[in-house]
Amino acid sequence: MDSLQIKNKVISEIEKIRTNLIQLAEKIHFNPEVSGQEINASRWISEYLERNGFDVQLRIGGLNTAFIACSGENPGKPFIAFMAEYDALPEIGHGCGHSLIAPAAAGAAIALRNTLPADFVNICVIGTPEEETTGGKLKLLEKGVFDNIDVAIMFHPHTITTGLRPCIGRTSIVFEFYGKPAHASTYPDKGINALDAVILTFNNINALRQQLREDVRVHGIITDGGKAANIIPDYARAEFFVRAREKSYMEEVVQKVINCAKSASLATAAQLKISSLMPTYLPDIPIDSLIDCFESNLRVLGYSTQKVSAPYRLGSSDYGNVSQKVPSLMGFISIAPEGTPTHSIQFRDAAISEKGLKVMIDAAKAMAMTAMDVVLVPGMLEQIKNEFVRKVSGSV
């Protein structure tokens, strides 16, 4: 059986379960659960995989809504993982389209299992909750869930179709300033204004922006700025995210932002405490051979792809941390016109549209076909691993 015949069989296998996958997507979409509370979504996906012959482990990595569903116990054979996300956004619901990601991962895994001989490959679906907040993939990485994976693959709906939309790194910084209260009119000289320190931090960062690379983002909010206008604030708090395409440069910018706060502390005499609100999301490592393979399979399915590079409206994801550990792919397929904001009601509606559901089915096909190439094309897995090693070591 040649490559095209095998891929046609994969496509046929996914068509057999099309209705089931759409029903899963609809259930998840209309019952949104925020990060850490994806009880129903994780159960629906894992139970569906179990009914299709996968061995399921629940609550892996200490996460109540994480799971791993595996098929195959073949030492020395490729181990392919499909990653599933299913957390929703507060108030908006599935405005990031995660209701499509998990069913697509399940469909790809089932099609691959039903197409390849059982002793050819090891397949799993890893349910990765909490992407929108604390990064479930980071916790699973820490617990060794990805240690034996050769290649990790996932799909994300978007407004463009491409095998690569770079993820920029993201670091969380919290600045708390402690001053001294006093009456703002009668004894202003007796106070130390913590809010002034926060405002100076913002002003210092704004002065810094001109000297930063174009892929950098520094954005923050004031969460506490005082209690009354006639009292000099003795406590003020601000949260910032620092993002950049390169890990080393992100760390450099983080230190510059910290220096902005330290200088504000020195200028106002307010004491400074620095902490972090969320774990650091790392930039992704793109594997060109995987990207080219995925895009080639998308074209077989009738899609045209586009090349995207920084600083094109880039966000951050715990996927980046996985890509630093395992050769990985996160492919994007458009479900809405370019310019439609993600994390929006418009994007949420696109995720449940006829087009959105069709894209989910096609994403399952493209991911399964790409995994098929990794397993069956002579030398491809070795090429992927060699490219990954070179990029991790910084030699390319």
Image (tube, rainbow, N blue to C red):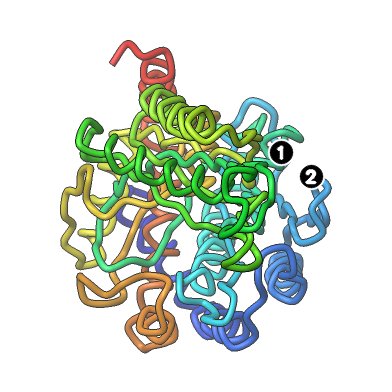
Q: Residues within 10 Å of mark 1 (few under 14, many from 20)?
A: some
Q: How many marks?
A: 2
Q: Is residue 130 visible?
A: yes
Q: Is residue 280 left or right of residue 97?
A: right
Q: Which mark is residue 231?
A: none
Residue at position x 25%, y 61% from top? 161
The residue that label 1 is drawn on is 145
Under circle 1, the secondary element is loop
Q: Which mark is residue 61?
A: 2
Q: Position of residue 196 (x, y in %)?
A: 49, 47
Q: Position of residue 307 (x, y in %)?
A: 17, 48
Tell which tag, 1 or 2, sits nearer the viewer. 2
Under circle 2, the secondary element is helix
Pick the quarter of the image with the C terminus. top left
Q: Amino acid at mark 2?
A: Gly
Is 164 rendered above or below residue 18?
above
